[in-house]
């Protein structure tokens, strides 16, 4: 929950449209400096004047619509930015290149569970029993 002066400052810094989007999507208003952007369009911000634990955050690329809360997901944050957001790294990946993704690694994808693109298993073993199919004889 934010204080009234902080909310008013957020309104004037963000503008009415961005202010309402942030209230709808994250339930709070946050103002900070843009630190970097990842390959998916997510923007990462920092404000050191905030209380500890609230100084770094992500603005998801899918957050640009009013009703997109269901489309935003923590698995949309790549590993190098996850480390910076959770204070495992002091400098963001744009500055500190120690978190290098190897070229042989699989391309990053978000968790697709519950979506039409979710992984579905299929059975490769033969069934032990054959299903009974009735034989229909013509009526006389």
Image: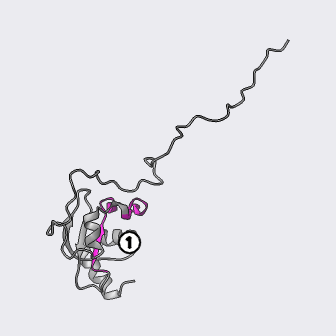
**Would residue 114 appear left or right of 134 to someone viewing this image?**
left
Residue in view at x 29 percent, y 61 percent: 78
Vertical position of residue 34 compared to residue 63: above or below: below
Vertical position of residue 85 compared to residue 134: above or below: below
Q: Residue 76, how many percent across, how many down?
A: 34, 60
Magenta includes 55? yes
Q: For numbered disc 1, what is the local secondary structure? A: loop
Instruction: Give the residue number, with chain letter if any, for mark 1.
Output: 26
Vertical position of residue 63 compared to residue 124: above or below: below
Q: Residue furthest left?
A: 95
Q: Residue 4, how many percent across, how many down?
A: 35, 87
| Residue 125 visible in image | yes
| Residue 15 visible in image | no
Q: Residue 3, how many percent across, how many down?
A: 35, 87
Q: Residue 105, how many percent across, how many down?
A: 26, 52
Q: Quadrant of the N terminus?
A: bottom left
**Toward which corner of the image does residue 91 lie, by quadrant?**
bottom left
Q: Quadrant of the C terminus?
A: top right
Residue in view at x 23 percent, y 80 percent: 47
- Segment tinted magenta in the rendering: 54-74
Residue in view at x 48 percent, y 54 percent: 114
Q: In front here: 132 or 57?
A: 132
Magenta includes 65? yes
Check disc 1: other Cα within 10 Å, few if <14, some if 14-19, many if 20+.
few
């Amino acid at each position: 929950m934010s204080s009234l002066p902080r909310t008013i400052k957020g309104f004037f810094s963000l503008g009415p449209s961005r202010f309402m989007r942030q209230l709808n999507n994250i339930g709070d208003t946050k103002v900070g400096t843009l630190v970097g952007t990842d390959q998916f369009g997510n923007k990462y911000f920092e404000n050191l004047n905030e209380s500890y634990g609230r100084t770094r955050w992500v603005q998801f690329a899918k957050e640009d619509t009013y009703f997109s809360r269901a489309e935003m997901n923590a698995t949309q944050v790549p590993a190098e930015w996850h480390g910076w957001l959770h204070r495992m790294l002091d400098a963001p990946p744009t500055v500190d290149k120690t978190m290098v993704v190897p070229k042989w690694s699989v391309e990053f994808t978000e968790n697709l569970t519950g979506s039409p693109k979710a992984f579905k298993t299929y059975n490769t073993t033969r069934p032990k029993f054959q299903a009974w199919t009735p034989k229909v004889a013509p009526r006389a």
